[in-house]
Amino acid sequence: MLQPIPRTQHFAFLLADKFSMYSLAAAIDTLRVANRFAGGDVYSWTTVSAAGDPVVASNDLPIKIDYAISDLQKADILFACLGVTTDFSGKSKALAALRTWGRRGAALGGLSVGAYLLAEAGQLDGHRCTIHWEYRAGFLENFPDIDCTSNVYEIDRKRYSCAGGTTSTDLMLEIVRRDLGPEMANRVANYLQHDRIRSSHDRQRVGQERDLNGVSDKLQKILRFMADSFDSPYSAKALAREAGISVRQVERLFLRHLKTPPGRYFMRMRLERARELLHQTNMPILNVAMATGFTSHSYFAQSYRSEFGRPPSEDRRQTY
């Protein structure tokens, strides 16, 4: 049985140049379909930018903006939506506005990399959040006291965040479920061809990670353990102990499902994390090496060059 239609909720989306169009569209279209099936405007939305000027998405499509952030009068949730960069024109105005909204006790959210802006504004202190996997390493280094998970979305009191892309749909479906009930959320998901509504406990797919649905729970547990242990690489024996199986079983699982030995897979994960830190932070290269479990700078540089075709110092220069 559908729940009674609540009052209209108004969501504002703070956009900056190079924001993720997919994340925004996934969020708004979920709300649009919910309105259609509810038979009324349960949700409405507004776009804002730092100065009220149009913005250009990361796919180069120009987007009309309704208001400057300083002119926004009311919103039930103000979402920040960023994309390939966390720096943009008018950022100081956006940060000031977010701090003002936070002091008023407003609900704030971040789509894709939007949590980064909320953190810079001091609006995630004491809250749990998530962010797109590609930016999580840099986020953790820059905001070590914030609990940033690798889950698809997080709702912690008045703070909403998701990893962007299809996870924007999952976050909005959870809001729809709370407002209109699970039957409506499922109906909206079916219309959007969203075959499974993920919960906040579901983990993002990370980097080059394969689809592990249906594979051994033991392997998934080992991979999660690896992802949380970059600074302290573990041997196959330690990984086996963590999963409660033998070393030989660990090796068989990796070769069967990932076509590579566990040590090689773990090395590639660590080097990919190192590359993220080089691209997203100003950490000295030696610190990046140590953060990803390399005690020797020369071994790190050699391994990095072997994996990516150029040394870490050159790769960092190519980023800017």
Image (cartoon, rainbow, N blue to C red):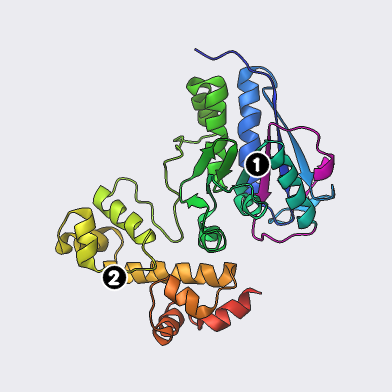
Horizontal relation, residue 22 to residue 293: left or right: right
The label nearer to you, 1 versus 2, is 2
Q: Secondary structure at mark 1?
A: helix
Magenta stretch encompasses residue 249: no
**Residue farthest along the bottom direction in this orientation:** 298
Q: Residues within 10 Å of mark 1 (few under 14, many from 20)?
A: some
Pick whichever, 196 or 125, lies toward us.
125
Q: Is residue 216 visible?
A: no
- Residue 192: x percent and y percent? 55, 33
Say above or below: 255 vs 22. Answer: below
- Is residue 52 found left or right of 140 in the rendered image? right
Mark 1 highlights which residue? 25
The answer to whether residue 62 is magenta is yes
- Above or below, comparing residue 187 to residue 196 in the picture: above
Gap in angstroms between the C-alphas marked 1 and 2: 40 Å
What residue is at 53 percent from the left and 22 percent from the top? 184
Assign a secondary structure to mark 2.
helix
Q: Which residue is mark 2?
A: 263
Q: Is residue 114 above or below residue 73?
A: below
Residue 302: which quarter of the image? bottom left
Residue stretch in magenta: 61-89
Q: Quadrant of the C terminus?
A: bottom right
User: Which amino acid is tagged 1?
Assistant: Ala
